[in-house]
Amino acid sequence: MNYLAPLRRAALAAALLLPLYAWSAAALPGNSVYRLDATLTDAAGQHFALHDMAGTPVLITMFYGDCHAACPVIIETLKRTVAALGPDGKRVRVLMISLDPKHDTPAALSSLLMMHQLDPAQFRLVAAGSDSQTRALAATLNIKYRVLESGEINHTTRIALLDATGAVLADTTRLDADPDPAFVKQVAALIK
Amino acid sequence: MKTQLKLVAAGLASAVLAMSHVTAATPSETALPTITQELLAPPLLPAPITRKTPAKVVVNLTVEEVEREIAPGSRYTFWTFGGTVPGKMIRVREGDTVELHLLNLPDNKLPHNIDLHAVTGPGGGAAQTLIAPGNEATFTFKALNPGLYVYHCATAPVGMHVANGMYGMILVEPKEGMTPVDREYYVMQGDFYTNGAYRAPGLQGFDMQKAIDEKPTYVVFNGADGALTGANALTAKANEKVRMYFGVGGPNITSSFHVIGAIFDRVYTEGGNHYQENVQTTMVPAGGSTIVEFTPRVPGNLTLVDHSLTRAFNKGAIGLMAVSGPDRPEIYSKGIKKPLAGAVAAAPAAAKPAAAAKPAPVVADRAQQLRGKAVYDSNCSACHQPDGKGVAGVFPPLANSDFFQQRPYEMAHIVLNGRNGEIVVNGEHYNGVMPPQDLSDDDIAAVINYVGVELNKGTPAVTPAQVRDMRKSRQP
Amino acid sequence: MNGRAAIRSALLTLAVLAGDGMAGDADYRAIAGGTLRSVLPADGVASPAIVAPYLLRTRLVTNAEFSAFVQHTPEWRRGQVPALLAAPSYLSGWSGATDFKPLAADAPVVHVGWFAAQAYCASEGGRLPRWYEWEFAAAADDHRADARDDPAWLAHILGWYADAGKQPPHSVATGQANYYGIHDLHGLVWEWVEDYSGLFVNADSRASGDQKLLDYCGGAALSLADRRNYAVLMRLALLSAMDARQDGANLGFRCVREPAPHEQGPRP
């Protein structure tokens, strides 16, 4: 396990040191979430860069698989948010990033998709490459989290709405299966 | 455990109310006029409220960490709301909506927040307002209850933040307003814990052990030993109705609040609705307040104290209110003293100077000169004037004074013991009363030498050791 | 095992892997780790933390070192960093994007946000320390591994707060190193940690336990275990008030490296 550590370190060094390759880098505003270099792995085992999500509106949040308190509620509220948007809802993509990359392997993410009956075309459950990267993603999204000895993770809740360039247009910290109507309105306005 | 959590979560999820980040203005809010709170440095406070309808009051309160004197010659790093200890007073009306902006200035070192006792809700605002230097937090609450409430910082470690001066008060006037008075003042008592002793010179640090043991070095009003004395004394005219908003920031000490020479006509106990009448001393808990009203009738100095007396006389819990007006001998007379018939008149307790020999030359010392000036400014200049000219016929001059130049040693004695009776200075007769000064040996030597060098172009004449001997040899 | 030789070879390995010439100069010391009776209990209630072995940079990162870093990596220069990753006050004491004058070359670099600090540490083949790693090393004074029960030592650390901190910080390593050979864990600047956002002190520091379960997802949030240690409580309070892109006039950092596999030594 440890021999991977230096490689991971080099990868992290590369990720943080190398300039952002121009996916229309000029089009990304300075406060775009996509300015953070991060490599994500989804439930299908596919690797991609965070900035590959640019181009469509995205609902972004963080969770972890072994979570049985808030996370099921977050997933439910996301499903209902998308449903509330009607047919336009297809234009929004949902990105859920794991707080626990060690345990949320592609296989684990895949079974979560099934368990919650999420459409993988729209809902992307992903994990970053390392704890440091996960921490950087949480920092960008203003999510606080703490890993306890038991493996349980205490974390705050935040769902952010990103426009096509990755700027945060709205967010909600409300934890309720029924989405915040004001937030839904803002998503609807964006995807029109 | 996990199943339990699932059930609890399911139950809570459906029942939990929105902690919504997206807030919408309520219809009544949009109709409220917006007022910006005027903030004044204590002991002043905003004027009484005259409006009869609710408003939204915007308060912009900074947090400033500043180093300044806690006692003459003794410095401390205070953490303050608005740059003052206590923090500036907020004054609103019952039912107002307060929009508080807390600004942690960028050159501060520490994070801070605020808990206002006027807030109804968990933490009193502390959780919503924790900010690092260079940031601003906004928190809105409704002042549901009238009263006089303390506010203070609640960042860990709370005892230290409060011990460094982070407290103030918010007055929520009742809907019907308060009865008019002629003068209002804002005073808070606090306890301070320093590594050094009382009035030790130089920059003092916070002493955590003394704080935990509740053994303060200073117990003072408005953040400094001498904050309400000398040139900073409160003032009033005889027959004016005075109201004092008095609170205790703590962190630990409860005050036995008393004004020597006055009786409280009304005490709104603990800052609440009901008042007691004709009170001498009222107890104010740490984190609590009181509103007192009294009417001075005769001229002179009224002294604010914590009547736990060694706090007043050894730790600084003393303030003055200078009352001006005509004498009222029928209410308050000057005393007359005479010897008992038949008793041998006791010699006046003028102790002879201990050494007849000329003392060894005293070395001029820059630190002592600065200290002497500080002592002079706080203790002597009120009467003898900052330039030492005195007041013709009333207070003798100290500058260019033949009396001083001829007998500096006796001057030290006068400062230590006081002096009644006639003296002649520069050819003028003076017949007043000089009260003894509560100063340390070092301070007396320092101030005499300051007067000698700066105001009389002479040389230092007195050492602290000589003052100590003088003190020891006087009759008890 | 000879600590110094081990460190040297570790440094060499890491320098090669990180592929960046700057990693060679900084001094990192091996710290064996162990159990830590922390101010933040590891289970949220009372249990001690277990700290795995790590290598800690003996000195805070200085202005000169950070200047060399931004010269090599222009995307971290003031004016070029995207707003997502740095605040307008980033390196505000410096006269130019790579010029740290009028600040001292060997004073700790301040006005650096979390992202920039992590990037610097990555350039040295490491990362920011985690809170427990910092607390573990900071429990030591100059001759004991754990001085926290000594009230005189606690009082001495608190002395830093008597200074209102209006001047830029002075040079690093002017005093004695602590038991582990580390300088300036106390008395100079605050320091970033990697998990600053997990310190979860309830911003109202007087609250204990009783939080809505869902606020922090099961978080019986942190009841602070040792309220006597005012100096550490203040560090926690500051870090939990920070956002990653923010910086501060009194906030600097140092780095940690994982020990190479042959470095780990016996388990504590």
Image: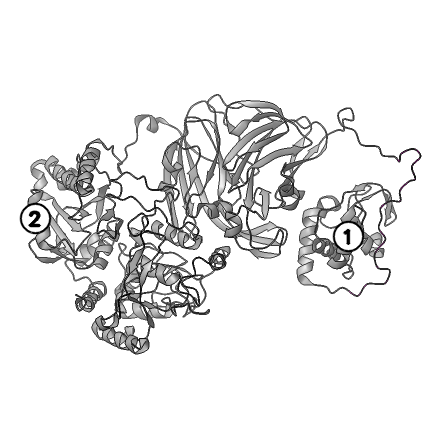
Q: With respect to residue B243, does A116 lie above or below?
A: below
**From which residue to which does the magenta span run?**
B339-361
Tell me where residue C49 appears, x and y as whole percent.
30, 56
Q: Would you say the magenta stretch is mainly helix, strand or loop?
A: loop
Residue at (85%, 34%) from the top-left corner?
Answer: B337
Crowd around label 2: few <14 · some 14–19 · many ≥20 (10 Å): few
Disc 2: which chain?
A: A
According to the picture, the residue beneath numbered tag 1 turns out to be B472
Q: Secondary structure at mark 2?
A: helix
Q: With respect to residue C51, does B191 lie above or below?
A: above
According to the picture, the residue beneath numbered tag 2 turns out to be A111
B118 left or right of C54? right
Tell me where residue B182 appears, x and y as whole percent.
61, 27
Residue at (23%, 59%) from the top-left corner?
Answer: A132
Q: CA distance from mark 1 to mark 2?
A: 89 Å
* The image quarter in which residue B392 lies: top right
Q: Identify the amino acid type marked 2.
A: Ser
Tell me where residue B240 appears, x and y as whole percent.
65, 27
Q: Secondary structure at mark 1?
A: helix
Quadrant placement of the C terminus of chain B: top right
